[in-house]
Structures are given as structure tokens and as C-alpha cells.
Amino acid sequence: MSATFKQDKIYGVFSSQEIKKVGTGTTTRKTVSKIFWFVEEAEDGSIVVQSINANYVPTGVKKKITKEVLLEKYSPEPEFYASAVYPKMKELDETLDRADESRKKGETFTAEFEYNHVLNIDIGNVRANFGIGLTYLERGDSEKAKNIFERLVNLEGAYAEEHKHLFNEFGINLRKSKMYTQAVEYYQRALQLNKTDENIFINLARVYLELKQYEDCFKALELALHLSPKHEMATKFIFWLKDKNLITPKQFSQIQNYI
């Protein structure tokens, strides 16, 4: 299996070198350490790199570099990818598939065991963190769910497009579990990273409704409609609030052109 190309795109493990000075004065010496990276070419042609941890799996925040930087400062490591990284990534994916299947079947303790196995290898694995968090929420274990929530809310990768379905499911389950304060913080964190997704505002509005914070609920829907005028769900939500007298005529008139 090639470690550097996948369907004519750059894909695999590369290394870079880091030079450090050790000691002081006449005892100063330079040391060179090799850092391994998982590298993949994105659809837009940019290069996405992610560090590889001691367990041979990509982990942490992904960053983008140019092809020029890759060619100048990184070296391909096809043997390391084939012998160490690829097998570990495959094992992790298979474990996650088993965990997801167990969770969907309601086998929450089996799912928890499998997700924890992944997290022992990669504590920042987004899919595993979402999965175990959902497992705890579905089991009604709010204390453990809160611990996972604290981790997820600080994982930037959790709000990436590839994890959108998990992000949505987790937020909905926070609300259903009546963890409203956490749900608000969760959606506000998402909005720090993406202010252009009207669905996040709509989900936030639902939480504010549960908290009976009707002014905040309206503002969230107003922002959603500014982003996506005539949005069916947001429009129905606004009319429902109007029918229940939870917004004022003045508020309703402010957004009439958007519904």
C-alpha cells in the first residue's frame, strides 16, 4: 500500500525535523528530533497535517500548509505508515464501528468499553468522545456526560464539517437530558467557530425556549433567518412563538421580511 498517494492525492505519513539547543555556555549542543505527521491533501488542494502520537495514531488539531512547505520541510515515511500507522488507524476505525453499533443497539456498557479503548490510545479522538458522551446521555448518567462535555467543548475538531451529524446529535441529547446550561455553552462554543450555520442558531433557540428565555430565543431565530431567509423550521418556530404570545408584535414586525 502506498503511504504517500491515495487516488492521486497526497496521503500518508511524513516527518519533519526539530532542532533544539541543550545546555548552556561551552556545554551547549544541538539535538535533532524527528516528528511524524499524518498528511492528507484536501479537496481545495491544501495540505492538512496532524501530529502522530506515541500510539501511532493521528491526533490533535489539524493544520493546513502549502504543498511548497510540505516538499521543502517534510519527508515521506511510507514504510512507517505501512508498518505502524496504517494498522493502528485500521484497528481504531474497527473499534469505533463496533462501539457505534453497540450504542445503536442499546448495549451501552459494551459501547462504553469500546470507546474507552479508543480513548486510551487517542484521548482527543472526536468520534470516540462524542460516542461515549452520547452513551452516557442515553443511559442517563449525567455526571459522566458532564465530564465528556467539558472535554468536547474544548475540542476544536468536534465542530468540523465531518463531525456535523455527531455534533447535532450530541447537542439534541444535551437538551433532551435537560442539561440546558451545558447545551447553551455547547452551541455558543460552536458559534465561536462557525457563525454562518443557521441550524446552530435554531438549536440554540430551542434551548432558550426550554429555559423560558424568550428574548434570547427570538434573537437566535432572528439571526438564523438573517442567514437563511424563509427558512422553514425557523419560520414555523417564529409563528409558534407569536401564537403563544411569547414574542411582541414589535419583534414579529422586525423579521416579517425574512419569514
Image (cartoon, rainbow, N blue to C red):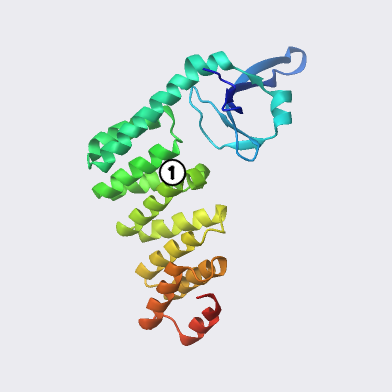
Q: Nearer the viewer, residue 8 or 143?
A: 8
User: Compared to 259, does 186 lie above or below?
Assistant: above
* Residue 125 drawn above or below residue 181: above
Secondary-structure class at tag 1: helix
Residue 34 in which image quadrant: top right
Q: Is residue 249 visible?
A: yes
Residue 52 x/y as whole percent: 53, 26
User: Which of the two residues, 105 or 58, is positioned nearer the viewer here?
Assistant: 105
Q: Which residue is mark 1?
A: 151
**Callout 1, which amino acid?**
Arg
Q: Is 240 placed above or below 227 here?
A: below
- What residue is rendered at 44% in x and 45% in y? 152
Residue 254 position, x and y percent, is 54, 81
Residue 55 at x, y percent in the picture = 46, 22
Dot 1 crowding, Cα within 10 Å, few <14, some 14–19, many 20+: some
- Residue 101: quarter of image: top left
Seen in the picture, residue 229 relative to 20 is either above or below; the reply is below
